[in-house]
Amino acid sequence: MSVNVEKQVHEVLEQVIVPEVMRSVEQMNLVRDVAITDGTVKVTLASTAMAAEIQNIIKGMVREGVSRVPGVTEVVVDFVDVKPKEINEIGKVIAVMSGKGGVGKSLVTGLLAVFLARNGNRVGILDADITGSSIPRMFGLTMHPRGSESGIIPVTSRSGIEAMAMNVLLEKEEDAVIWRGPLMSKVITQFWEEVLWGKLDYLVVDLPPGTSDAALTVMQTIPLTGVIDVFTPQDLTEMIVMKAVNMARKMNVHVLGVVENMSYLVLPESGKKMEIFGASKAEKMAAVTGAPLLGVLPIEPEVARLCDAGDIEKYHSDAAAELFNNVIAALNEREAK
Ligand SMILES: Nc1ncnc2c1ncn2[C@@H]1O[C@H](COP(=O)(O)OP(=O)(O)O)[C@@H](O)[C@H]1O
Ligand SMILES: [Mg+2]
C-alpha cells in the first residue's frame, strides 16, 4: 500500500511546476524526502533559490495534489535549506575551448547543447566567457534569472535548455564587463556552485579564448568529463591548438577530440568545396595532438544568420550531426575505460 502511495506522491511532485521557471520540483531536484506514516505524507523540499511567496505557492500545490492520492489523510510540507551544489545532479560536463577567439567555440557549444536536447537529454549551458558572453544572443535569451539569497535559477531557452551567462545578469546586453581575472574566476565558481541546475544529463561549458585564468578556474573547479578543442585552418594553428590541448592535459582533463570549424565553403552555384582559409588541417591537428578528429564544419552564412537572430535552435546540418555523434561516441568510449 505505502509503496503505491509513495509512487503516486512522486508522480504528483513530477507535475508540480515551479512558477516562472516552468520546471517541476522533481526536475529541479528539490524533493529531499517523502515520508509516509499511515495516512500522513510528509514532503520535505529544498527552499533553495525560492523567494518566500514562491515557497508558499509550491506548498499549496503539493498539499493539494498529494491530498488527492487515495489513502492520504494529511499532508505536511516542510522546507529545508540546502546549497545548490548539494542539489545539482549533473551527468557529464563537456567544455569547449580553443587557443584563440572567433574560431567558433560558442557556436560548437550552442549546437552541441541543441543536438543533445533534441535527443531527449536534459541539458544546461554554463557560459564561462564572462567578458565575451555570446550564448544568450545565440539562443535569443532576454529574461533575467530568478532566485533568492540561497541560489540562482538559470534561464530556459525555447527548447528547454538551461543557461547561465553574464549577459543574462546585465541590465543591458551591451553593457561592458571590465573585470580582472580573480573577479571572473569568482563568477565562474558561482555559476557552478550557486546556480540551481537541478538534474541534468549534460552541462556544456563555453570557455573564453586561450589559456587564461578563466579557463584555469573552470578546469580546477568543475569536474569536466572532457574538453573539445576548436580551431580553424589558419596560420599558427598548430601552436595555438597545442597550447590549449597541453593546458587540458596538464590539468588532467581528458581531451575528447578536436574540431575544425570554417573548414570550407560550399559554392551555391556549383556545389564545389572551396577552402577559403587554405587546405584543411584537420587530420594534421588530430595527429599532432594525438586526440581524435571529431568533425569538420563548413562556413555557412545560414548558421551565422541564425545565431545573430537568436534562432540557433532551428539549425540542422549533417556535418554537425556527424560531429556530435562522434562526441557521444568519444564520451561512451571514455566511460567504458
Ligand atoms: N561555421 C561557421 N559558419 C559561419 N559563421 C560562423 C561559423 N562558425 C562561427 N561563425 C560565426 O563567427 C563568429 C564567431 O564565432 P563564435 O562561435 O562566437 O567564436 P568564439 O566563441 O570562438 O569566439 C560568430 O558570429 C559566429 O556566428
Ligand atoms: Mg565565444
Image: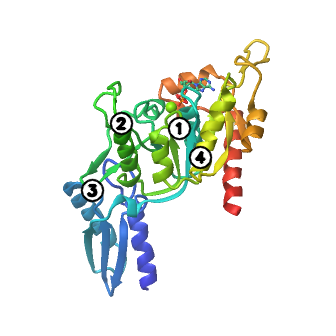
**In terms of depth relative to the viewer, which is nearer, 326 or 12?**
326
Residue 279 falls left or right of residue 180 = right
* Identity of the residue drawn at 54% across and 21% down: 305
Alpha-carbon distance for marks 1 and 4?
Answer: 9 Å
Residue 226 falls left or right of residue 123 = right
Residue 147 coordinates in the image, percent (x, y)? 28, 49
Q: Quadrant of ligand 1?
A: top right
Q: Are marks 3 and 1 in contact (CB under 8 Å)?
A: no
Alpha-carbon distance for marks 3 and 4?
Answer: 32 Å
Sequence-earlier tag: 3 or 4:
3
Sequence-earlier tag: 2 or 4:
2
Residue at numbered disc 4: 248
* Identity of the residue drawn at 31% across and 72% down: 44
Q: Residues within 10 Å of mark 1 (few under 14, many from 20)?
A: many
Residue 164 seen from this side: yes
Q: Residue furthest left?
A: 52
Amino acid at circle 2: Val
Residue 119 seen from this side: no
Q: Residue furthest bottom?
A: 38
